[in-house]
Amino acid sequence: MKIKSGQIVIGLLALIIGLIISVQIHSMDGNVIGGGLVPVQKAQSLAQELNKVRDEKEVLVEELKELETKIKEIEDAESKDDILIRNLVSELDKYKMISGMTAVIGPGITITVDDPAEEEMDYSDMSVIMYNYDLLLSLLNKLNDAGAEAIAINDQRIVAITEISLAGSNVNINSIPTAPPFIIKAIGNPDTLESTLNIRFGIVDQMRNRYNLQVKTQKSDEISIPRYNDIIKFRYAVPVE
């Protein structure tokens, strides 16, 4: 009963976060003037409201983490005397790692991708790696091909619903604006990951020689990757009975 109560509270928190974000989006949509242009004063007001919503969301996420910790304590206490529950908790932990809902640690590789050196830059103000952000997608695919078990870019956990897209002067990852240098962390066999990326005419070779990007790879015995810091909600998909 304690576990179910915790899960109900988590569900309510997820609903509250969704409502806050929905209200903010509708509020912003209703204040667009002249084909998408708004006065500077109005834009500043909207920015303040958005920051307020983000702060409220962070508070709710922290409360969610506290509830998850309490549920974990209850599960651990119950599983000490019940093999079935202990096995279920073990399975739950495994699927949390797969879905990115828990932080993980292990051996792997760190890749740092930055724009060309200043003397190699052209006269454009646009960041090379941001303009060619699809290279990040290719890099992620290669890491997955090499057996990476968890990946993060600039501490944004990559999960099934992660989007990487150019938005104005930033690259959004999980709807969070990011900018170079991009630090990609991947947990897996360090030798396999590194050799896959550094293969001749591979993705790293292409980044360096075709785009003059600065790319560094470093193997490590221990890499820490954070959890996905949001709530995954399904609007259309349902389990098959």
Image (cartoon, helix red, strand yellow):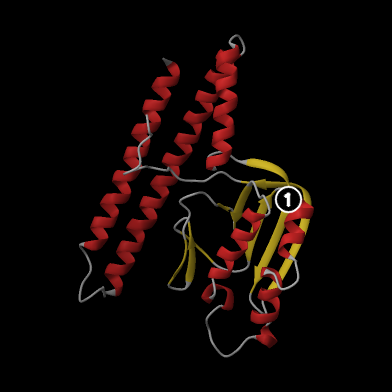
Q: How many residues crowd around disc 1 within 10 Å: few (fewer than 14), some, or many (20 or more)?
A: many
The mark total stands at 1
Quarter location, residue 192? bottom right
Rendered position, 51 above or below 69:
below
Q: Quadrant of the C terminus?
A: top left
- Residue 202 placement (x, y as % from top left): 69, 69
Extreme-front residue of the structure? 241
- Residue 102 placement (x, y as % from top left): 57, 38
**Circle 1: residue type:** Gly
- Residue 114 placement (x, y as % from top left): 65, 71
Disc 1 target residue: 108
Q: Residue at x 33, y 44 (%)?
A: 18
Q: Quadrant of the N terminus?
A: top left
Q: Residue at x 59, y 33 (%)?
A: 94
Rendered position, 32 above or below 78:
below
Q: Give the left or right position of residue 63, taking residue 224 as reference.
A: left
Quarter location, residue 138? bottom right
> Which residue is more in the foreground, 36 or 46?
36
Quarter location, residue 51? bottom left
SS for callout 1: strand
Q: Give the left or right position of residue 135, taking residue 214 as reference.
A: left
- Residue 27 placement (x, y as % from top left): 24, 57
Q: Residue at x 30, y 74 (%)?
A: 40
> Which residue is more in the foreground, 6 or 220?
220
Extreme-top residue of the structure? 81
Q: Give the left or right position of residue 43, taking residue 34 as reference.
A: right
